[in-house]
Amino acid sequence: MTEREGEIQEIRLGDCPICGGKGTLKAIQYVHDIPYFGKVMESTIICERCGYRNADVMILEDRPPKLYTVKVENEKDLFTRVVRSKSGTIELEEIGVKIEPGPAAEGFVSNVEGVLERVRETLIMAKHFRQSEGDEEAVRKADEILEYIEEVKAGKKPLTVKIADPLGNSALIGEKVKSRLLSEEEIKKLSLGPYKIVEPEEAGEGEESD
């Protein structure tokens, strides 16, 4: 099937693996072009019965495994685009936050400010949980990071944002962004999220010709 730019496509996928709903699973796909970067497809799988949802982002051009870095120093830098696929690892250096992809990771297209908002919401939830447990040190640490995030958003504190993707499906896009190829050692240390790299000899194992 050929994806056309700017067109939202709905594809029926069959039964839901979560609730067992018959024919309730569908995928919604949207292809758009990001200036100076290329075509990106955002895909969301939804169950109409139980509400199960999972999103991903895929770059529709071959790109090598890369590390992207940007130093956020003013409010304008917050608009740096973030394309994060299920295999992308985001690191916010000064506040010690790393968002690694797990089996249920979701992809998204946003900007640095949007990523900070996601982190802020997660920290607030974690802070409330720690408060209920009486963990004062964890609460204090969460407050420090939340305060730093607000100062970054106000252009008062710097923040180094990195995104690395062994499959090449994630990126930072903006005037100040720097990038380089990932080394083999770096690739081995990164999580692939729900994906798995299949080696050529592995793919051929067990295959017999009739």
Image (tube, rainbow, N blue to C red):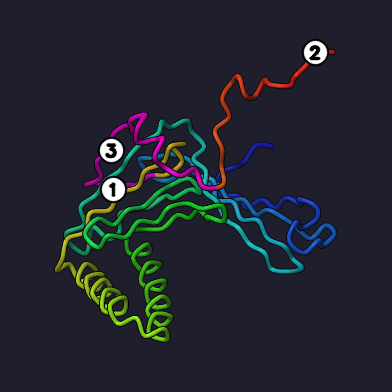
User: In the current view of this chain or complex, which residue is farthest to the top?
Assistant: 210
Label 1 amino acid?
Gly
Mark 1 or mark 3, earlier in chain: 1
The residue indicated by pointer 3 is 179
Q: Could you say whether the residue bearing mark 3 is in a helix, strand or loop?
A: strand
Image position, residue 166 (x, y; %): 43, 37
- Please say whether residue 178 is one of the residues in the magenta stretch: yes
Image position, residue 112 (x, y; %): 32, 59
Cα–Cα gap, marks 1 and 2: 50 Å
Dots 2, 3 in contact, CB < 8 A: no
Q: Could you say whether the residue bearing mark 2 is in a helix, strand or loop?
A: loop
The mark found on residue 209 in the picture is 2
> In front: 67, or 195?
195
Cα–Cα gap, marks 1 and 3: 11 Å
Mark 1 or mark 2, earlier in chain: 1
Count residues near mark 1 (Cα–Cα under 10 Å), then give few for <14, some for 14-19, many for 20+: some
In this view, 180 is above or below 40: above
Count residues near mark 3 (Cα–Cα under 10 Å), then give few for <14, some for 14-19, many for 20+: some
Left or right of residue 29, residue 70 in this image: left
Left or right of residue 197, residue 205 in this image: right
In this view, 54 is above or below 1: below
The residue indicated by pointer 1 is 174
Of the residues tagged 1 and 2, which is closer to the observer?
A: 2
Q: How many marks?
A: 3
Label 3 amino acid?
Ser
| Quarter of the rendering occupied by the C terminus | top right
Magenta-tinted stretch: 171-193
- Please say whether residue 29 is one of the residues in the magenta stretch: no
